[in-house]
Image (cartoon, rainbow, N blue to C red):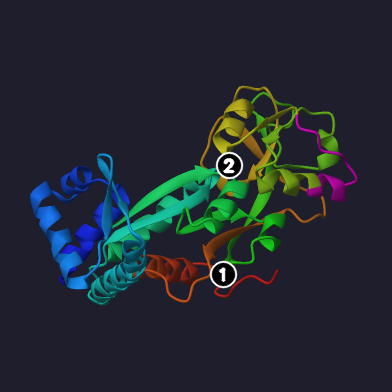
């Protein structure tokens, strides 16, 4: 029994077809069949049975696959750890991220990280806070960046780290009467049309809380899913908006106003990962790097 034959076995179990598995492994179908036959002979049990043009894993094969998957995962982790120790870490990290954080914070973070680990690749999924939390909980992503949310109390299999606190500001079109000002009170904007995030974003609830603190009601004129759509609508003169200063500072075509009200104008931004005893070396190294560059280095108290 050798390492390569176990990889072949995993491929056939996944594809349930010898031809497709052989094509993915870049070997001939006959060579693949011989490898599986060799495994079956050594184990003294059939691993697959024919099912039309495909194959179906047997109960013996299904049980064996559980141990093979565990063994291969351990071996892969060992290879990563050695690469990590030699600063030659390789692999791909999948990250879900609220839309606005793909504009500056996350690209800057990855750029700094890749100085040390240039061979680590990233798959980035811009999405909403709700989807970041749920998808990380489901294991669809290695980690996620999202805004503060009540959902954090629901998914207790996740660890949450507050990595930033962002100030919420008001942005108005260039031709707006307040465009020449540096600040305003929310009461001055009570008759304005606002474009805002929809209910999948933690920002909508933060903005509502701020208006409630100021004894006002917040009812958006338009709701969208992402920061760039909000910015574009403000630029068009259609409405005002409340956004994070980090999002507003790199844009032109509107004015940024600090909120004067004595209310909580800061939104926590969190990194979330599934709670595990051991992470792959790529995920572990990036997690450590992020926490070293944040103000929080322990799970947030909920």
* Residue at the image point whose x is 30% and y is 54% from the top: 13
Q: Is residue 201 above or below residue 178?
A: below
Q: Which of the two residues, 22 or 101, is positioned nearer the viewer here?
A: 22
* Residue at the image point whose x is 29% and y is 60% from the top: 91
Quadrant position of residue 263: bottom right
Provide residue 205's location: percent of width, then percent of height: 74, 47
SS of the residue at dot 2?
A: helix
The stretch in magenta equals 209-220
Count of marks placed on residues: 2
Residue at which label 1 appears: 295
* Left/right of residue 72 with respect to residue 133 in the rendered view: left
Asked if the stretch drawn in magenta spans residue 210, the answer is: yes
* Residue at the image point whose x is 69% and y is 35% from the top: 196
Provide residue 24's location: percent of width, then percent of height: 20, 47
Q: Mark 2 Cα within 10 Å, few/some/many (few <14, many 20+)?
A: many
Quadrant position of residue 176: top right
Q: Which of the two residues, 258 or 44, is positioned nearer the viewer here?
A: 44
* Res 237 visible: yes
Q: Quadrant of the N terminus?
A: bottom left
Quadrant position of residue 298: bottom right
Residue at which label 2 appears: 248
Question: Which of marks 1 and 2 precedes in the sequence?
Answer: 2
């Amino acid at each position: 029994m050798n390492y390569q034959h176990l990889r072949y076995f995993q491929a056939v179990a996944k594809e349930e077809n010898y031809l497709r598995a052989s094509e993915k492994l870049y070997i001939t179908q006959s060579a693949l069949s011989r490898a599986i036959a060799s495994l079956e002979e050594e184990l003294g049990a059939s691993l697959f049975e024919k099912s039309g043009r495909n194959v179906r894993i047997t109960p013996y094969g299904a049980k064996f696959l559980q141990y093979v998957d565990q063994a291969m995962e351990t071996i892969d982790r060992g290879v990563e750890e050695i690469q990590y120790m030699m600063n030659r870490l390789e692999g791909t990290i999948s990250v879900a991220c609220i839309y606005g954080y793909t504009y500056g914070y996350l690209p800057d973070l990855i750029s700094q990280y890749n100085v040390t680990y240039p061979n680590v690749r990233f798959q980035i999924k811009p999405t909403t806070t709700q989807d970041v939390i749920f998808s990380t909980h489901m294991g669809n992503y290695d980690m996620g960046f999202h805004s503060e949310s009540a959902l954090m109390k629901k998914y207790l299999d996740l660890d949450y780290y507050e990595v930033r606190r962002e100030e919420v500001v008001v942005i108005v079109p260039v031709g707006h009467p307040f465009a020449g000002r540096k600040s305003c009170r929310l009461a001055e904007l009570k008759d304005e049309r606002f474009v805002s995030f929809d209910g999948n974003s933690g920002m909508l609830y933060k903005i509502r809380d701020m208006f409630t603190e100021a004894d006002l009601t917040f009812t958006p004129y338009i709701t969208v899913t992402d920061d760039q759509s909000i910015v574009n609508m403000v630029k068009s003169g259609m409405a005002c908006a409340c956004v994070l200063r980090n999002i507003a500072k790199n844009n032109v075509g509107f004015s940024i106003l600090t909120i004067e009200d004595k209310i909580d104008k800061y939104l926590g931004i969190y990194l979330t990962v599934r709670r595990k005893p051991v992470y792959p070396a790529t995920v572990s190294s990036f997690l450590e790097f992020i926490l070293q560059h944040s103000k929080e280095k322990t799970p947030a108290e909920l």
